[in-house]
Amino acid sequence: GSNGHAMLKNLDGAVGDLDQALKLSPSSTELHVLRGQLYFEFDEFASAEESFNRAVQLAPNNAAARKGRGAARTKQSQLALAVADFQSALKLNPRDPEVHYLLALSTMRFAIETPGNDGARFAEALKSAQQAIECDRLSGAHLAVSHAHRALGQVSLAGGDLAEIRRCLVDDR
C-alpha cells in the first residue's frame, strides 16, 4: 500500500541524490557501487547491475563492484556470469567470506539448474563454502556445505555439518 509507495519515493530521492553527486564526480567508482547497492536493496536488480557495470568499467580491480554485480546477476539468474564475477572478486580479495559464500550459492544453483550436471559443480560449491568457513566460521557457509554434501549423496557428512553449526553457535555465546 502506501508504505510501498513511500519506500519507492525514498529510492527515487536517494537515487536522485546519487545522480547529483555523479554529475559532480562521474568517475567515482564508490558512487556507482553505492548506487548499485541502493538499487539492489530495493530489488531493482537490472538497475543495480548497470551501476555495478559502470563501476567495473571505471575500476576493473574493484572487488566490491564485482561482488555487487555478481549478486545482482545471481538475482537475475545469470548464474554463469555471476560465478565469473565472484571468482574475479576473490582474486582481488581472497579472504572475503561473503564472496566465497555467494560463489558457493550461485555455483550450487547453477548445478541444480543445469541439465546433465555430473556433480562437479556441487563439488566446486562445496569447496567455496568450505573456504568461506575458513575465513569466517560462523558464516552461512556451513549450511551451503551441508546442502552440497546432501546433493552429492553424502548424507552422513551433511549431518556432521549441521552438528558443527550447533557447536559454533554454542561456542560463540
Image (tube, rainbow, N blue to C red):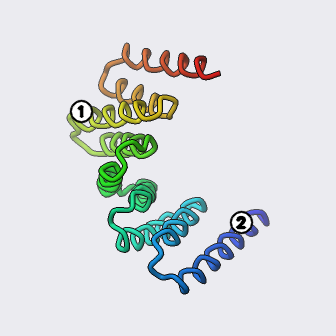
Mark 2 lies on a secondary structure that is: helix
Q: Where is residue 104 in the image (x, y as percent from the top left)?
A: 37, 40
Farthest residue, direction right: 2
Q: Would residue 15 be found to the left or right of residue 86 on screen?
A: right
Tell me what residue is drawn at x 47 percent, y 33 percent: 136
Q: Where is residue 87 in the image (x, y as percent from the top left)?
A: 30, 50
Q: How far apart are marks 2 and 1 (CA)?
A: 42 Å
Number of marks drawn: 2
Tell me what residue is drawn at x 50 percent, y 34 percent: 139
Q: What residue type is labelled 2?
A: Met
Q: Would residue 162 be found to the left or right of residue 125 on screen?
A: right
Q: How crowded is mark 2: few (under 14 residues within 10 Å), some or many (20 or more)?
A: few
Mark 1 lies on a secondary structure that is: loop
**Quadrant location of the C terminus in the rendered image:** top right
Give residue 119's mark. Answer: 1
Q: Which amino acid does label 1 sit on?
A: Gly
Q: Mark 2 points at which residue?
A: 7
Tell me what residue is drawn at x 71 percent, y 73 percent: 9
Q: How crowded is mark 1: few (under 14 residues within 10 Å), some or many (20 or more)?
A: some
Q: Pick whichever, 168 or 10, lies toward us.
A: 168
Q: Position of residue 24 (x, y in %)?
A: 55, 85
Q: Pick whichever, 159 or 17, lies toward us.
A: 17
Q: In the image, is residue 79 above or below residue 129?
A: below
